[in-house]
Amino acid sequence: MTDDEFQGLYGAPPDGLSPAAPGAIQFSPLMPGAAALEAQAPNSLAGFVMLAPPGTIERRYAAALGLQALAAGAPFTILAPKDRGGSRLAAELEALGCIVQDQAKRHHRICTGVRPATLVGLDEALAEGGPRQVDGLWSQPGVFSWDRLDPGSALLAQHLPALAGRGADFGCGIGTLALAALASPKLTHLALLDIDRRAVEAAKRNVTDPRVTVRWADVRQPDATLTKLDFVVMNPPFHDGGAEDRSLGQTFIRRAAESLRTGGRLWLTANRHLPYEAVLKPLFKRITPVVEASGYKVYEAQK
Ligand SMILES: C[S@@+](CC[C@H](N)C(=O)[O-])C[C@H]1O[C@@H](n2cnc3c(N)ncnc32)[C@H](O)[C@@H]1O
């Protein structure tokens, strides 16, 4: 297969809306192991299907990268739910120099076209959506709370005790909680895990302490290296693919319980409305609500 026969896929479009070519290369930064669209040679793909991400800057960036990777004249299909960027998608692609057909189907807008010989505003879209520093930390549009410190994380960071031994930060984002945890000299090792490659790359730049390892991984998958931990810290996600998904945070809590030694502690911050107590109860010996402020609450749970 020559390079120009490769097809690209970004994300998982709903069944039947836009089938990608079999064997297409997956580029979603939210799928551990996927290829990086940033690293794909320009003009190298023979076709491209993208479920465009919800954030405006992130979507323009992903579309610009996809178009840049596509060979001139090669076809693309870029789609998004109507209420998560779909209604603006055609205009955004036109602003990048494309002529698009815009079709409405099952609450999505589906834009098709071919890659024009000349793209417009590519450099701006790539610069705006690429990694950048915010308040001294590396971040990127699209990662969790990319341009401001999340109040729930801030609350947990303020109340973390001096942690000791081996631990993990589940869903580490750009490394905010890890930096707070690493203030303790008794901490010997901290494993940072996140499903978002962009967050992992930012965390690697932000958290350079030799006691850490940073991994692009799905916390829902069992991990034999994470056992008998002394502590886990987390601000669990409650969205999956843009939709609220409470079971994701509940799975994070179960994984934490499985990873801790008896007596090990979970430090958790969450929106007050999220129903995590019922999940914590059967898994932990002692659950202590530590603080509640500005709509968030912090728990310490001992296994
Ligand atoms: C609420 S954010 C917290 C981020 C960071 N700890 C902080 O405090 O700023 C949750 C993080 O979990 C990550 N995440 C979501 N689903 C995940 C999964 N299945 N496995 C690993 N990380 C996941 C998200 O990418 C996001 O960075």
Image: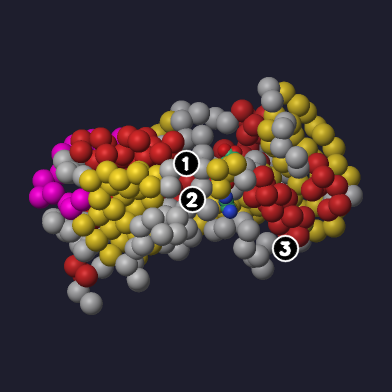
Q: Quadrant of residue 64?
A: top left
Q: Residues within 10 Å of mark 1 (few under 14, many from 20)?
A: many
Q: Position of residue 18 (x, y in %)?
A: 35, 57
Q: Residues within 10 Å of mark 2 (few under 14, many from 20)?
A: many
Asked if residue 35 can be seen in this view, the reply is no
Q: Are the residues flagged by discs 1 and 3 in contact, CB closer than 8 Å?
A: no
Residue at 59% from the left image edge and 48% from the top image edge:
171
253 relative to 180 in the view: left or right? right
**Could you tell whether 38 is left or right of 260 in the image?**
left
Residue at the far right in the pictured view: 285
Which amino acid, by three-letter code, is at mark 2? Asp
Of the 4 image quadrants, the one containing the N terminus is bottom left
Q: 258 or 265, which lies in front?
A: 258
**Is 115 part of what is drawn in magenta?**
yes
Residue at 27% from the left image edge and 43% from the top image edge:
102
Identify residue for label 1: 143
Residue 44, horizontal then vertical, whole percent: 20, 62
Query: Mark 2: is the Cβ under 8 angstroms from ligand 1?
Result: yes
Amino acid type of disc 1? Answer: Val
- Regarding residue 298, the answer to whether it shows in the image is yes
Structural distance between the alpha carbons of marks 2 and 1: 7 Å
Q: Are marks 2 and 1 in contact (CB under 8 Å)?
A: yes
Query: Which is in the foreground here, disc 3 or disc 2?
Result: 2
- The residue that label 2 is drawn on is 196
Which range of residues does the magenta coloring cover?
Answer: 113-128
Residue with the mark numbered 3: 227
Residue placed farthest to the left in the image?
A: 117
Ligand 1 lies under 8 Å from the Cβ of mark 1:
yes
Marks 1 and 3, how far apart at CA: 28 Å
Q: Secondary structure at mark 3?
A: loop
**SS for dot 2:** loop
Q: Earlier in the sequence, mark 2 or mark 1?
A: 1
